[in-house]
Image: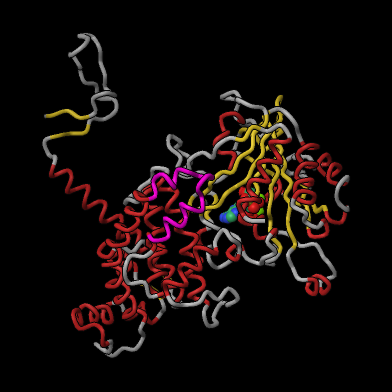
Amino acid sequence: MTAQQIRQAFLDFFASKGHTIVPSAPIVVKNDPTLMFTNAGMNQFKDIFLGESAAKYPRVADTQRCLRVSGKHNDLEEVGIDTYHHTMFEMLGNWSFGDYFKQEAIAWSWELLTKVYGISADRLYVTVFEGDEKEQLPRDQEAYNYWKQHIAEDRILLGNKKDNFWEMGETGPCGPCSEIHYDGRSEEERARVDGKALVNADDPNVIEIWNNVFMQFNRLKDGSLQALPARHVDTGMGFERLVRVLQGKTSNYDTDVFQPLIQFIAEKSGKPYNAAATPGTEGWNEAVAMRVMADHIRAISFAIADGQLPSNNKAGYVIRRILRRAVRYAYQYLGFKEPFLNQLVPLLAEQFKGVFDELWSQKDFVQKVVSEEENAFLRNLELGLRRLDTYFDLSNEMGIATHLDEDVAEHIKIKREFNEDRKNRLVNGTFAFTLSDTFGFPLDLTELIAREKGFNVNVEQFEHELQQQKNRSRAATAIDTGDWVILQDDDSVEFTGYDETETVAHIIKYRKV
Ligand code: ATP
Ligand code: MG
Ligand code: MG
Ligand code: MG
């Protein structure tokens, strides 16, 4: 099955079970101070779970574009290194809002995976919440009993609160969850470990594919649990992981979701994609670079299409950091010295035509934004990388690097000034700050490059420099606008324009003195 067919089969299956298929919410979240990007299918239904708005339909299903690069879910560091965490991914989901519950949810997920998709039952494990006495959370015996009707008991594993109990926050809706894992190990390997069940462990071939959350409690302020009058089902399945399983691959990147992008990158760079390369062996850095680029362009493109331009703060800076990370990989390991990433946008838009048309309809705009960002950063990237090269070069001779003709002085300075730190394999925080301030190297990019060379970054010192700079610019602003004062919240200002008697301290915050 192609990825397209796999996605469609999911939606068709749940439509046949009475679900309304709804569109994905944008990946960019506006008007929620607790969340910058959609990180799960349930985000757009949060108010229904909180009881603050009514569900339009009792059963819905969709594919939701998600981003996990900040906050509670941040998978950025795994991307390109492991085979199954992405920045942007699709979460297939089905929901029941006070309608069906565990029995149907479990039966349908089993039916879909084993009958519709034909996954062999002896490749699947499920997990069920074991309970937590200290927190007075009951074991999910109900889910256990329903699973028993489908799968051998030695494949039902008990899991702890961390993995098998879901909470929206300190208070509010919560409940046990039940995950489905796929064992993609070779027969030999399975025989070697005696078919021993293995989930949430370090075997890259045993992966979690689907999570079924059963919301049945409301946690109150005093910590106690109250049964919810309306119980809900909230599920999420990683689309790219499912495609990998169904296409018989050992990496998400080997599926038709990523291969067109990776092959394009390989062709244009003139380097082959070596899927089997392992850390430290030939072709590893190039392979990671190709995976990172194929992954990051998806996150960047959808964020821009959904209204989040790269910028210097908040959500915009998250996107800019991802973009610069991809540009650095492209430049350093694949030799792309000119803007290239943007050329992936039309390919991607084509791929998502009919799925997420937002990208197709804005592909020219998105490409232009990416291209401009690349242009701006590439100019500085080279200069910054040269300084880092000098920094990492632990020989103490001055001016040994031959490519430094135009700024030899600067490089000699680096060697002298930071020699102690360099010897200790530490990137000086002031130096890292200069890279950020002058060349636009986000801190995490410097950290990544440093890590590759076996160096750490003095983050505390970096933060200190950043704070100093903020203080300086605040002071400068105060001088510039010296004839305005900021009123305290309790300072009242008489506003006499509309109503002689009204006092509106909160409307007018600034007053000319
Ligand atoms: P993992 O333990 O593998 O990090 P998770 O438990 O954090 O996954 P959930 O929050 O349960 O993931 O999300 C539901 C499903 O979404 C997962 O079962 C998985 O298939 C998929 N998923 C989660 N994170 C990612 C990611 N970064 N990239 C691709 N798919 C993901
Ligand atoms: Mg995770
Ligand atoms: Mg997990
Ligand atoms: Mg999970």
Q: Is residue 22 magenta?
A: no
Where 226 sits versus 66, above or below?
A: above
415 lies left or right of 352: left
* Helix, strand or loop for the magenta stretch, by majority: helix
506 lies left or right of 445: left
Residue 476: x %, y % from top left: 17, 48
Residue at screen point 81% across, 71% down: 193
Residue at screen point 68% across, 46% down: 9
The scheme the figure's colours follow is secondary structure
Q: Nearer the viewer, residue 393 or 118?
A: 118
Residue 325: x %, y % from top left: 41, 63
Residue 388: quadrant of the picture: bottom left
Where 378 sits versus 301, above or below?
A: below
Residue 449: x %, y % from top left: 41, 71
Residue at screen point 37% across, 49% down: 316
Q: Nearer the viewer, residue 13 or 185?
A: 13
Part of the protein shown in magenta: 343-363
Residue 198: quadrant of the picture: bottom right
Q: Nearer the viewer, residue 393 or 336?
A: 336
Instruction: Report whether residue 125 is seen.
Output: yes
Residue 168: quadrant of the picture: top right
Residue 289: x %, y % from top left: 47, 70
